[in-house]
């Protein structure tokens, strides 16, 4: 039995965005074999050339004669490389991979930060469905001023089973024909169905075939994964299972630093630390702030909006008045200067969370006490109480000067 897969434009499903390859369950012969969802055939026969042996001198000459290597993601991932993007539950893994797909397809920086090379993208998206994918891609493209329907992105709304011979044949035919610069499989747990994540050898059997297919055609491969639930470890050590972090040459881990939802607009702000590890890159961490909001939060068809910005870590304060204060007090002072109004501990906490520098209520109260002692902050109410309010003394002085000017 064969499954027939045929192209179908996304506008037939919801509204125009990008072209989608839907895995149609049509039980009739087709010109190209797809994959059956219940098939779990082992990879019995290795593709020709997999075990080719050559002299070291031949390998050195071949590498020297090849074009110079380029980055797919500047400083993070080389073209033709393979790796993992992982994060905790609801941290925005799919938003990160959608941003990357748009970035490579359009030649714009990933997350607005990391330059990318340009080329077609193949995305296997096993979660979300067509409407959510359409909203997500429109939001990312709007943030770049790009028409989503113009992008060379191919999407399949299922993920291939990595040990299915017919699934891998389908994937290789698509890659050989379209030559994508990047292949994304989201999520791994659906693609590696039946595998024991704690078994390194079993996970290796699942991951090797698609890796070899992509490498054979010069495509980079990124698998979207999730963190373990133990809370132990940092960065790639949080990736679930034994195989993914050992297999990937590039490991990108996203940690949530803070979350905040506006009580009125329902806009969501998440601050994330992106941890990068790889065998050819220096380990590094980048902190970003991602905002998502809808024109009408109660309407599931309302356009989404997407915004990402880099957060710079505060250094030594340039203001002499702040010298000697603890970092928490400097952060609270910056929040009060930003708002320039009377603020409660909760207001300050919300401002800090949105800025990506969250503090606990008790820490904010201690910082406010230090700022009052330094004459930088004026209190209204009971000092140290969560019911009091505070204002920047500088902002208050400026307001008084403005009033006196009239």
Image (cartoon, rainbow, N blue to C red):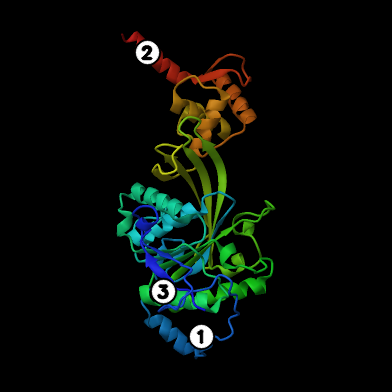
Q: Which residue is mark 1?
A: 47
Q: Earlier in the sequence, mark 3 or mark 2?
A: 3
Secondary structure found at label 3: helix
Q: Quick one: label 3, few (<14), some, or many (20+) residues within 10 Å?
A: some
Q: CA distance from mark 1 to mark 3?
A: 17 Å
Q: CA distance from mark 2 to mark 1?
A: 79 Å
Secondary structure found at label 1: loop
2 vs 1, front mark: 1
Q: Residue at x 42, y 54 (%)?
A: 99
Q: Residue at x 53, y 31 (%)?
A: 350
Left or right position of 55 against 195: left
Q: Earlier in the sequence, mark 1 or mark 3?
A: 1
Q: Which residue is mark 3?
A: 174
Q: Which residue is mark 2?
A: 401
Left or right position of 224 against 10: right
Image coordinates of residue 2 in percent, x first then y, are 49, 77
Image coordinates of residue 22 in percent, x first then y, are 43, 65
């Amino acid at each position: 039995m064969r499954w027939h897969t045929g192209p179908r434009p996304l506008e037939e499903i919801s509204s125009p965005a990008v072209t989608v390859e839907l895995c149609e369950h049509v039980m009739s012969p087709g010109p190209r074999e797809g994959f059956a969802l219940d098939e779990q055939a082992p990879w019995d026969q290795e593709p020709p050339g997999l075990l080719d042996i050559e002299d070291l001198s031949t390998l050195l000459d071949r590498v020297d004669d090849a074009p110079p290597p380029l980055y797919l993601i500047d400083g993070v991932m080389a073209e033709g490389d393979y790796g993992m993007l992982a994060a905790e539950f609801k941290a925005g893994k799919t938003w990160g991979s959608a941003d990357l797909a748009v970035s490579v397809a359009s030649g714009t920086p990933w997350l607005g930060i990391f330059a990318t090379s340009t080329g077609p993208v193949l995305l296997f998206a096993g979660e979300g469905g067509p409407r959510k994918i359409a909203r997500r891609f429109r939001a990312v493209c709007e943030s770049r001023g790009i028409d989503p329907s113009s992008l060379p992105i191919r999407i399949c709304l299922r993920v291939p089973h990595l040990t299915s011979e017919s699934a891998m044949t389908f994937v290789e035919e698509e890659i050989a024909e379209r030559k994508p610069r990047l292949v994304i499989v989201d999520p791994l747990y659906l693609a590696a169905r039946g595998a024991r994540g704690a078994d390194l050898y079993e996970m290796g059997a699942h991951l090797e075939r698609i890796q070899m297919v992509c490498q054979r055609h010069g495509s980079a491969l990124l698998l979207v994964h999730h963190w373990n639930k133990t809370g132990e470890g940092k960065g790639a050590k949080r990736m679930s299972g034994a195989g993914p972090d050992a297999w990937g040459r590039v490991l990108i881990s996203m940690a949530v630093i803070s979350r905040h939802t506006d009580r009125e607009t329902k806009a969501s702000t998440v601050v994330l630390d992106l941890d990068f590890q790889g065998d050819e890159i220096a380990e590094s961490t980048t902190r970003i702030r991602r905002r998502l909001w809808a024109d009408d939060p109660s309407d599931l068809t309302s356009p989404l909006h997407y915004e990402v910005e880099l957060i710079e870590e505060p250094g030594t304060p340039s203001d002499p008045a702040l010298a000697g204060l603890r970092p928490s007090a400097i952060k609270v002072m910056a929040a009060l200067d930003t708002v320039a109004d009377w603020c409660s501990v909760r207001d300050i906490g919300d401002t800090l969370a949105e800025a990506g520098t969250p503090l606990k209520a008790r820490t904010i109260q201690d910082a406010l006490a230090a700022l009052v002692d330094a004459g930088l902050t004026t209190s209204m109410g009971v000092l140290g109480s969560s019911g009091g309010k505070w204002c920047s003394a500088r902002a208050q002085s400026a307001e008084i000067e403005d009033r006196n000017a009239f």
